[in-house]
């Protein structure tokens, strides 16, 4: 069955950096677009970024453009999100999801807390 | 950017009753690229409906979606105890993909 497992979250100071990872199994990872979607505590959902199967097409939300970088390693069945210049408003659970349209498979999420 | 507005914000009903949740888009969502998700506390969202009216794999037939253009509806025909949760609509007609703010379905 499809499994997505995120890691790399934690507590970081404003202005700091963090790299999230998502390891996929149960499907042919290289066939699928992948996404990062976040949810601030007690709030709704925000699509952060997606990347095409080959990595040639990338989208970023305006709120993270220039600060976050999405990437993938199809040989390792892994998706990444490099987050730089973190702000308090980036505090959220970050979900890895399969697809860029209406994901039917999500990871359990990893919490990123930006606080001094 | 397509803004999705869900109503009501909170819906209080009893098990066995029918639930009707609304999602209105700020501009037309072409080809009915509209999805619905259920989310329970501490869990990831679960896809219920895609293409406005197609149930995702494994979703019970008490869940149904309808609508087109700017007005969409999620109906739960007979509420089961496990259906009380948050529900979000989402459009994938254009980028940025956007979600509604959610409807909380609570037990009356």
Image (cartoon, rainbow, N blue to C red):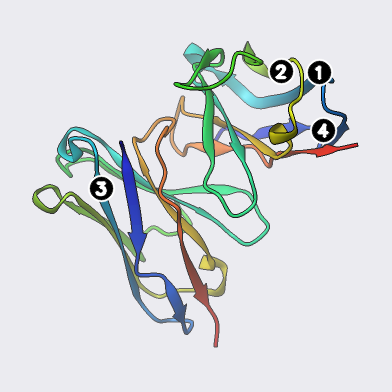
Q: Position of residue B6 (x, y in %)?
A: 73, 32
Judged from the image, the secondary structure of the residue bearing numbered disc 4 is loop
Q: Nearer the viewer, mark 1 or mark 2?
A: 1
The residue positioned 75% from the left and 33% from the top of the image is B81
Q: Work out how far the residue at label 1 is from the one at label 3, CA to CA, in angstroms.
A: 38 Å
Q: Chain of mark 4?
A: B
* Dot 4 and dot 2 within a common chain: yes
Mark 4 or mark 2: which comes first in sequence?
4
Quarter of the N terminus of chain A within the rendering: top left
Q: Chain of mark 3?
A: A
Mark 3 packing: few (<14 Cα in 10 Å), some, or many (20+)? many
Q: Chain of mark 2?
A: B
Name the quadrant containing residue B73. Answer: top right
Cβ atoms at labels 1 and 2 below 8 Å apart:
yes
Q: Nearer the viewer, mark 4 or mark 3?
A: 3
* Dot 4 and dot 3 within a common chain: no
User: Which residue is under mark 3?
Assistant: A24
Q: Does residue A73 show up? A: yes
Q: Work out how far the residue at label 4 is from the one at label 2, CA to CA, in angstroms.
A: 13 Å
The residue positioned 39% from the left and 81% from the top of the image is A16
Q: Which numbered dot is residue B8? A: 4
User: Which residue is under mark 1?
Assistant: B18
Judged from the image, the secondary structure of the residue bearing numbered disc 3 is strand
Q: Position of residue B11 (x, y in %)?
A: 84, 34
Q: Does residue A66 show up? A: no
Quarter of the C terminus of chain A within the rendering: bottom right
Q: Work out how far the residue at label 1 is from the one at label 2, CA to CA, in angstroms.
A: 7 Å
Mark 1 packing: few (<14 Cα in 10 Å), some, or many (20+)? some
Q: Position of residue B27 (x, y in %)?
A: 61, 23
Mark 2 packing: few (<14 Cα in 10 Å), some, or many (20+)? some
Q: Work out how far the residue at label 3 is from the one at label 2, CA to CA, in angstroms.
A: 33 Å
């Amino acid at each position: 069955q499809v499994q997505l497992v995120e890691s790399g979250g934690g507590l970081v100071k404003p202005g700091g950096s963090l790299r999230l990872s998502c390891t996929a199994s149960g499907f042919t990872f290289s066939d699928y677009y992948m996404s990062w979607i976040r949810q601030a505590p007690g709030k709704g959902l925000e699509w952060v970024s997606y990347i095409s199967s080959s990595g040639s097409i990338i989208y970023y939300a305006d709120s993270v453009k220039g600060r976050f970088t999405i990437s993938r390693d199809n040989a390792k069945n892994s998706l990444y999100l490099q987050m730089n210049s973190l702000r308090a408003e980036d505090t959220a659970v970050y979900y890895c999801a399969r697809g860029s349209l209406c994901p039917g498979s999500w990871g359990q999420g990893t919490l990123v807390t930006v606080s001094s | 950017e397509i803004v999705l507005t869900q109503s009501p914000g909170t819906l209080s009903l009893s098990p066995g009753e029918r639930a009707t949740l609304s999602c209105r888009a700020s501009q037309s969502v072409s080809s009915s690229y509209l999805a619905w998700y259920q989310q329970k506390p501490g869990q990831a969202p679960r896809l219920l409906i895609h293409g406005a009216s197609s149930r995702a794999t494994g979703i019970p037939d008490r869940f149904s979606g309808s609508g087109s253009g700017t007005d969409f509806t999620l109906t739960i025909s007979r509420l089961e105890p496990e259906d009380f949760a948050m529900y979000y609509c989402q459009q994938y007609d254009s980028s940025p993909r956007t979600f509604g703010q959610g409807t909380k379905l609570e037990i009356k």
